[in-house]
Amino acid sequence: MALRESTAKAQSSFADYCRTGETSGIEGAREDRISQYRRLVFSVVQNALNTAYPIVQKKYMSKEDWESLQHRFFSNHPCSDPQIWRMPSELIEYVEQQESELCSKYPALLDLLRFEWQETYLFMMPDLELPHHSNHCPSLSDKVVLEQEMQLLPLKYPVHNTHPSKLKEAQAGQYISMAWRDREKRHVHFMGISVFFALVLENLNTSDITLLEAGKKVALQFGITTDHWKEELDKFVAKLHQKHLIFKA
Amino acid sequence: MENRKAKLITGGTLIAGGLLISGNLQAEELFQANDLGSGAEVRAELLKSERSVINGLELTCGESEEASTEASCGEGSCGEASEEAAAEHSCGEGSCGEANEEAAAEHSCGEGSCGEASEEASAEEHSCGEGSCGK
């Protein structure tokens, strides 16, 4: 049923007030009562953000900066997802687009937000069926099947293995946080892997090629002239197979 | 179950030799693969100085001991939690039970209800998507 124009306008003004705290003459609203709605709504948002990003909140940003960011985010960003647990993911987009000054002050902020969200995302993601495969550990000459409930997150700072207090001293570079959801217990697990291995996995995921072919391609990109990488790749694949992340096709 | 191939890389692109630019890439860095453990273990490590023991993100389903540390709730209920243990657990659509001190102040439920809480955990501080907050 369509709302009357005046009702829709009042609702919209009320929603704006809940987000910004700025009243714009909502008819019939009492100042001493309406503020309770904003307090309660913002509390929900704040709790969702604190829960999603405990490391950013407690260890990386100052309390003042974090709370100020939460206010700016809720006031300025048109959150679009109706599910509250998804809302914190929109903070990443907001920070990336609107908070360049804050990112200068906290260079690893975006990485840390993405890293913390990676766990929630994988934990809550829809089930993905594993393609048909054997249970054997693949050799380099084999084509493989990769775990689908797995994600590689490229990072500029090593937020996945560095205490937040040490991040200021950390060297910017390219780091990879590999995360996956255990199919039995549904826990999310993490591994820090090199760019070399990440590129091999990406090639395997996007092309119908063998481990050897993928390895050769990446070794060439890196300008590696010896065959040492084959032994290392073999060890890496065995490690992934133990964790049920790669199988012989 | 959905049957589709997942995108493997998220939030950026990989550049071969991205670390080579920094000029100090060692062989062990080129071929490193370090197990970091579960999300709860990683968090405990990164929050270490204040919290030597964190029971993790996915706290409490059922009543087993194991569940109390890392069980996950898709649409379940979270049981009793104490102090910091509950700080980092989240439920998709569940209800969070009794909690105390700062615990309830920091956990959230997608669509659930938050139960009894004490001290700092006043009703206005804990959140429910579409639920009710207890006393």
Image (cartoon, coloured by chain):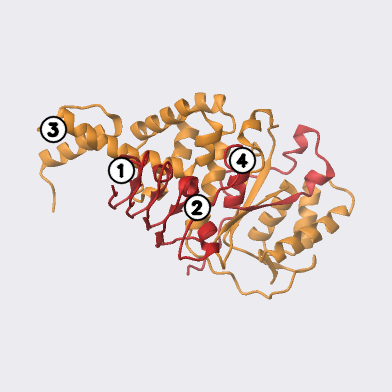
Chain colours: A orange, B red
- Asked whether the residues under marks 1 and 2 belong to the same chain, the reply is no
Write down the quadrant of residue B123 in the picture: top left
Q: Amino acid at mark 4?
A: Lys
Q: Which mark is residue A26?
A: none
Which tag, 2 or 3, sits closer to the chain's start?
3
Dot 2 and dot 3 residues touching (CB under 8 Å):
no
Say what secondary structure mark 4 lies in. loop
Mark 4 vs mark 2, foreground winner is 4
What residue do we see at 82% from left, 46% from top?
B28
Mark 1 vs mark 3, foreground winner is 1
Q: Amino acid at mark 1?
A: Ala
Residue carrying label 1: B123
Residue carrying label 2: A121
Q: Nearer the viewer, residue A96 or A117?
A: A117
Circle 1 chain: B
Residue carrying label 3: A29
Dot 1 and dot 3 residues touching (CB under 8 Å):
no
Residue carrying label 4: B48
Q: Amino acid at mark 3?
A: Ala
Q: Amino acid at mark 2?
A: Tyr
Distance Cα–Cα, label 1 vs label 3: 23 Å
Dot 4 and dot 2 residues touching (CB under 8 Å):
no
Q: Nearer the viewer, residue A166 or B65?
A: B65
Say what secondary structure mark 1 lies in. helix
Distance Cα–Cα, label 4 vs label 3: 47 Å
Crowding at label 2, few (<14), some or many (≥20) Cα neighbours within 10 Å?
A: some
Q: Is residue B11 above or below residue A38?
A: below
Circle 2 chain: A
- Asked whether the residues under marks 4 and 2 belong to the same chain, the reply is no
Distance Cα–Cα, label 2 vs label 3: 39 Å
Mark 2 vs mark 3, foreground winner is 3
Mark 1 vs mark 2, foreground winner is 1
